[in-house]
Amino acid sequence: MNFDKILSIAGRPGLWEIKAQTRNGVVAQSLVDGKKLPVNIQNNISILAEIAIYTYTEEVPLREVFQAIGEKNNFKKTISHKSSKTELEDLFQEILPEYDEDRVYASDIKKIIQWYNLLVEKGIIDFSKEEEEANQEEENKKEESKKEN
């Protein structure tokens, strides 16, 4: 699944997949229960491909953080997002030792762990950039083919 099509909507639990574009926004489908929801441009949405985690030296894309969690857990579910703050921070310290503890809060770590587990539950376990680029190229070819017809 393309990370450019998965989003988080403020005030709504879980992750959502963009299904269609409308004049005023998008139609998103919940990865949790499959319900569809119109999301307009006034909603505060975050596309997973655009989220990065602060470290002391750079910002690490969320995809790379998911990849690191996956490699540590053989691309199976990790600890629960309801685990203690200490457990969550210890896990994050293992997978991203350079994360900026002053700018990455426990609530951020909790959300990242929750999202990772949800994606794994839905069978989305390839977080590599190459997979993303291959999917994007395939979509571009389909669109070009439609334009030619």
Image (tube, rainbow, N blue to C red):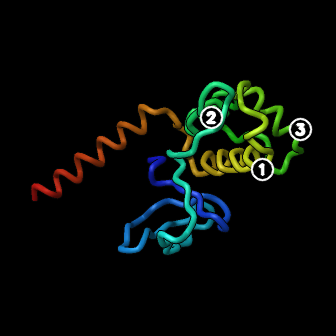
Q: CA distance from mark 1 to mark 2?
A: 16 Å
Residue receiving disc 3: 86
Q: Nearer the viewer, mark 3 or mark 1?
A: 1
Residue 34: image quadrant is: bottom right
The x, y position of residue 19, in whole percent, is 42, 64
- Near mark 3 (Cα within 10 A), the count class, few <14, some 14-19 or many ≥20, is few
Specify the label residue 65 is tagged with: 2
| Residue hosting label 1 | 107
Tell me where residue 99 appears, x and y as whole percent: 71, 31
User: Picture coordinates of residue 74 (x, y %)?
Assistant: 66, 30
Quadrant assignment, res 113: top right
Which sits earlier in the primary sequence, circle 1 or circle 2?
Answer: 2
Q: Amino acid at mark 1?
A: Ser
In this rendering, the count of numbered labels is 3
Quadrant of the image occupied by residue 93? top right
Residue sitting at x 67%, y 38%: 76
Residue 77: image x %, image y %? Answer: 70, 41
Return the residue nearer the eye: 69 or 76: 69
Residue 1: in sight, yes or no?
no
- Whether residue 38 is visible here, answered yes or no, is yes
